[in-house]
Image (tube, rainbow, N blue to C red):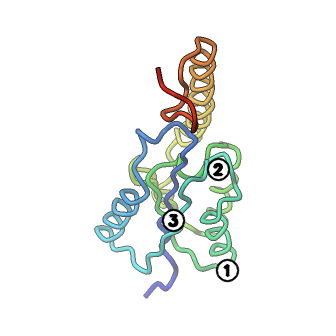
């Protein structure tokens, strides 16, 4: 019987501009739990970073995963997709190398990536694209807000106290 952990990692950023494309934390949990159950993974624990950008590597849930790995307690990590790990492709690559060195399996369920079955040749490019997409979306949002502000239009959904809407 394998007593190593199966970590289900969920992350959702409120700043990355992908809220409408990403599953909520609750849906990510359900999605990963169902996959784990269907595929016989046991000793399941959640590590979650709700409201943390993938550009940050000091996320509490991610740091807990790193501690679990250091202790030798992790058998596999399940994530929805590679973008949940992070937005910096070099750091993601370094993390994948650490997993490989410690014999920890990574499964990105939605993308069909499973390091136990060999790496997907396009995995590094997915990470590069995810990083580019986050930066491009952020730049576009700033441009839209800048244009709306310059035109004298509202840039928020609520007016500050004391202001009247025309």
**Residue identified by numbered label 3:** 77
**Residue identified by numbered label 2:** 92
Q: Characterize the local packing of mark 2: few (<14), some (14-19) or many (20 or more) Cα atoms within 10 angstroms.
A: some
| Secondary-structure class at tag 2 | helix
| Secondary-structure class at tag 3 | strand
User: Viewed as shown, does residue 116 lie left or right of 102?
Assistant: left
| Along the viewing direction, whichever of 105 and 78 lies nearer the viewer | 78
Residue 56 lies, in percent from the top left, at 68, 50
The answer to which of marks 2 and 1 sits earlier in the sequence is 1
Q: In 3D space, how far apart are the residues under numbered discs 2 and 1 (Cα atoms)? A: 20 Å
Residue 161 lies, in percent from the top left, at 57, 39
Quadrant where the image shows the N terminus: bottom left
Q: In 3D space, how far apart are the residues under numbered discs 1 and 3 (Cα atoms)? A: 15 Å
Residue at horizontal 31 percent and vertical 65 percent from the top: 34
On screen, residue 60 above or below 22? below
Residue at horizontal 41 percent and vertical 39 percent from the top: 21
Q: Characterize the local packing of mark 3: few (<14), some (14-19) or many (20 or more) Cα atoms within 10 angstroms.
A: many
Residue at horizontal 38 percent and vertical 62 percent from the top: 32
The answer to which of marks 1 and 3 sits earlier in the sequence is 1
User: Viewed as shown, does residue 30 lie left or right of 15?
Assistant: left
| Along the viewing direction, whichever of 44 and 41 lies nearer the viewer | 44
| Along the viewing direction, whichever of 149 and 39 lies nearer the viewer | 149
On screen, residue 106 above or below 164? below
**Residue identified by numbered label 1:** 71
User: Viewed as shown, does residue 38 lie left or right of 147?
Assistant: left
On screen, residue 25 above or below 127? below
């Amino acid at each position: 019987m394998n007593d190593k952990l199966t970590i289900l990692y969920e992350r959702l950023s409120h700043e990355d501009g992908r809220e409408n494309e990403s599953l909520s934390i609750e849906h990510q949990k359900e999605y990963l739990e169902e996959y784990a159950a269907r595929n016989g993974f046991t000793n399941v624990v959640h590590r979650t970073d709700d409201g943390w950008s993938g550009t940050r590597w000091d996320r509490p849930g991610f740091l807990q995963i790193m501690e679990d790995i250091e202790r030798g307690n992790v058998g596999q990590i399940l994530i929805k997709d590679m973008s949940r790990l992070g937005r910096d492709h070099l750091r993601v690559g370094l993390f994948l190398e650490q997993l490989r060195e410690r014999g920890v399996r990574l499964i990105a369920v939605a993308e069909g990536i499973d390091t136990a079955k060999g790496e997907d040749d396009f995995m590094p490019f997915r990470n590069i694209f995810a990083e580019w997409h986050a930066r491009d979306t952020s730049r576009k949002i700033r441009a839209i807000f800048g244009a709306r502000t310059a035109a004298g239009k509202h840039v928020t959904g609520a007016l500050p106290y004391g202001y009247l809407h025309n």
